[in-house]
Image (cartoon, rainbow, N blue to C red):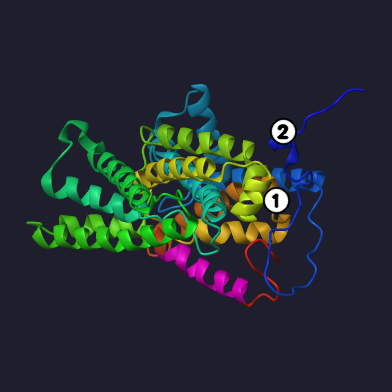
């Protein structure tokens, strides 16, 4: 007789569509779509994203048709030649708008992805990528560089580097302050992050007050409301790599996120080291969020609302949510950025204004939806 030994991994839930624990009596959830339906939906979102990117690159103060936009993109990618009369259009398409739109894709996908991970990590439906003080810390770092002139050796990237270092410093401080003998619990993590966010905002206000010019005020508005106006080809690769690494790591741990969402007692009974998993998620989400904030500022509501919308459609399984949520976030961010730079052209609206105008009614609708709770319908 051959004996078998079950590992902790084998004791994880065998199905992907187990609903997360809810409170009270709710209507029975609709069945989640099959994996074939999920694949079809993902392909459809990819097509929609590609079309949105081409349209967003062509629209602006100088309108370029989708056919001409695609032709200029193809010429830039393949090294093809263009007529001398179209050099200016080529520069607008490839040097100005393309990196901006692609950065919107990456940041939108990243915020949605991190939002899913953080909501599972702290088991809080109101958690988003900035609940742990990352955005406030990044603002302090950016304003410090602007006021005191540090990191001058990095040139135009000095402010972004300062924001990234500020975000990492804030994350480290939140972790150290939230840590106890019992480890890092979700409630302590959230409360510490919220408390220190107010502290970072106070420091930022003090720096603005002491600043010799009004430049710091403009910098704060940028980091608190968000913009892709500073997007360049040199800033895009680092953020894209960070988001790609997060996708791979989170998808590989999707089943563990399912169990973690059920509570620490259930996770421990199934062999999950909740402390180690939570610390790993904290480090990953902090680094990725810091990288995004460094190049775009803090853009609210995307990481909060997109995970909930995705769960309504595909179910609570993180294996499904982590596939669809980044695509939805990317599409939303491309169109939000397009509205931000065209609604009141030639002036540009802060991205946070657009995402809030969309996110607030959506979130209120979700709250009024009968039976909807974190992970429910």
Which quarter of the rendered picture does the C terminus lie within? bottom right
- Vertical order, 118 against 92 (above or below): below
Residue 208 visible in the picture: yes
Viewer-side residue, 356 vs 308: 308
Q: Main secondary structure of the magenta part?
A: helix
Please say whether residue 322 is one of the residues in the magenta stretch: no
Q: Give the residue displayed 55% in from the left and 34% down from the top.
A: 71
Name the front one of labels 2 and 1.
2
Which quarter of the rendered picture does the N terminus lie within? top right
Viewer-side residue, 197 vs 7: 7
Where residue 206 sits: x, y (%)?
Answer: 15, 61
Crowding near the residue tagged with mark 2, few <14, some 14–19, many ≥20 C-alpha atoms within 10 Å? few
> Which span is picked out in magenta?
353-367
- What is the secondary structure assignment of the residue under circle 2? loop
Left or right relative to 75: residue 189: left
- What is the secondary structure assignment of the residue under circle 1? loop
Residue that badge 2 annotates: 7
Where residue 262 sits: x, y (%)?
Answer: 65, 56
Q: Give the residue displayed 55% in from the left and 49% down from the top.
A: 117
Residue 297 visible in the picture: no
Q: Give the residue displayed 17% in from the left and 31% down from the top.
A: 153
Please say whether residue 362 is one of the residues in the magenta stretch: yes
- Vertical order, 147 against 6 (above or below): below
CA–CA distance between discs 2 and 1?
Answer: 21 Å
Residue that badge 1 annotates: 317
Where residue 342 is drawn, which disc sits there?
none
Where residue 352 sits: x, y (%)?
Answer: 40, 61
Where residue 314 sits: x, y (%)?
Answer: 72, 55
Viewer-side residue, 51 vs 27: 27
Q: Earlier in the sequence, mark 2 or mark 1?
A: 2
Crowding near the residue tagged with mark 1, few <14, some 14–19, many ≥20 C-alpha atoms within 10 Å? many
């Amino acid at each position: 007789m051959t004996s078998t030994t079950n590992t902790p991994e084998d004791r994880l839930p065998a199905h992907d569509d187990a609903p997360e624990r809810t409170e009270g009596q709710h209507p029975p959830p609709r069945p989640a779509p099959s994996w074939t339906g999920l694949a079809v939906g993902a392909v459809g979102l990819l097509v929609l994203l590609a079309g949105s990117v081409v349209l967003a690159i062509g629209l602006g103060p100088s309108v370029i048709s989708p056919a001409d936009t695609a032709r200029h993109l193809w010429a830039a990618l393949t090294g093809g030649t263009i007529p001398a009369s179209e050099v200016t259009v080529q520069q607008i398409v490839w040097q100005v708008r393309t990196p901006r739109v692609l950065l919107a894709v990456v940041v939108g996908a990243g915020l949605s992805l991190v939002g899913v991970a953080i909501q599972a990590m702290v088991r809080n439906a109101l958690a988003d990528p900035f609940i742990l003080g990352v955005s406030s810390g990044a603002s302090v770092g950016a304003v410090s560089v602007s006021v005191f002139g540090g990191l001058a050796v990095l040139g135009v990237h000095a402010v972004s580097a300062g924001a990234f270092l500020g975000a990492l410093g804030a994350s480290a401080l939140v972790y150290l302050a939230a840590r106890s003998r019992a480890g890092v619990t979700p409630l302590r993590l959230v409360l510490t992050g919220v408390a220190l966010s107010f502290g970072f905002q106070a420091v930022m206000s003090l720096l603005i007050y002491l600043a010799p010019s009004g430049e710091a005020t403009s910098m704060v508005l940028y980091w608190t409301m968000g913009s892709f106006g500073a997007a360049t080809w040199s800033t895009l690769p680092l953020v894209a790599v960070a988001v790609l690494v997060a996708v791979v790591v989170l998808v590989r741990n999707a089943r563990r996120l399912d169990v973690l969402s059920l509570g620490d007692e259930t996770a421990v009974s199934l062999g999950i080291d909740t402390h180690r998993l939570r610390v790993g998620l904290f480090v990953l989400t902090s680094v990725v969020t810091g990288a995004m904030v460094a190049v775009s500022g803090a853009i609210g509501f995307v990481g909060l609302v997109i995970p909930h919308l995705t769960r309504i459609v595909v179910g609570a399984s993180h294996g499904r949510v982590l596939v669809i949520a980044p695509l939805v976030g990317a599409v939303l961010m491309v169109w939000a950025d397009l509205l931000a730079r065209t609604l009141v052209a030639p002036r540009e609206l802060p991205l946070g204004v657009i995402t809030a105008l969309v996110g607030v009614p959506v979130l209120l609708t979700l709250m009024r939806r009968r039976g909807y709770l974190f992970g429910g319908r």
